[in-house]
Amino acid sequence: MRHSLPLAPQFYVTAPQPCPYLEGRMERKLFTSLQGDTAEKLNNSLSQQGFRRSQNVLYRPSCADCAACLSARIDVSAFKPSRSQRRTMNRNLGLERRASSPWATEEQYALFRRYLDSRHADGGMADMDVFEFAAMIEETPVRSRVVEYVDQDNQLAAASLTDVLEDGVSMVYSFYDPTLERNSLGTYLILDHIEIARAAGLPYVYLGYWVPGSPKMGYKCKFAGLELYHRGKWEKMRDPHDYDSTTHPLKSDPIAEQVANITLPDSRPPYKP
């Protein structure tokens, strides 16, 4: 089904499929394409309204059964590491950060496969081959970077595909060596992206979605300064149980109403003399 606004990007809805976060529920996504001279503006604007990027598509969960998927970001100015997070930073002092243009490598794919096979063997990306991986990394119409972390032997330990937004950095997809469980690399990548954003003078780190009731997403609650996009605005995260009602089927607005409430940037391409 297609939904659109005058002189605006067209929005579509995916067919329902099993929800990866809440058992027994079905998910669908509202999405639009990223292309042309306005891609950067659209990515900035919709990221601030709870959308996420996947290659040249921006999407946001739009399920009939609930509205539990809430976009999450960290307010860098409000973040203070916990004792456990400080230990995580200390355990990974030997890693070196390297940022580059979004270009896929065989070493990245090998690490990606080990990560998926260990952590998400039954997930939607489990069958991704090297060509699909390269497309995930390289097919980006916006300002993106691959942030790699190598150990003292120059071996790749972790990586993140990261978008640079006008108000922050967005961690599109991260993966790491599953054998280094003690290093808490998933947590470390977020901590280091907070430092990346702070050094660049950017106020937020966008983390993707937090889902109340999903154990997979519980780690995001452990970061101070966490904000959620809830009922059309960003708010400081309250007690996680305050969001349990979002799983109720009556909490999901009709698709047409969701599209009507999206704020779009000026869709005209920049003037070129």
Image: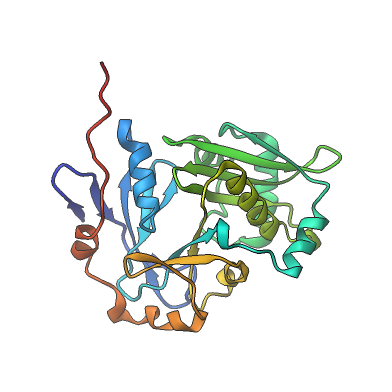
Residue 14 image point, x, y percent: 31, 57
In this view, 219 is above or below 42:
below
Q: Quick one: quadrant of the C terminus?
A: top left
Name the one closer to the observer, 251 or 169.
169
> Is residue 168 among what the camera can see?
yes
Q: Residue placed at 34% from the left, 40% from the top? A: 41
Where residue 232 sits, quadrant-wise, is bottom left
Q: Give the residue drawn at x 38%, y 38%.
A: 40
Q: Residue furthest right?
A: 153
Rendered image coloring scheme: rainbow
Q: Nearer the viewer, residue 268 or 155?
A: 268
Residue at 72% across, 43% down: 149
Task: Name which quarter of the figure residue 180 lies in.
Answer: bottom right
Q: Please name the residue shown 53% across and 59% down the image.
A: 75
Above or below, 132 against 234 in this view is above
Residue 167 spot, x, y in % from top left = 46, 47
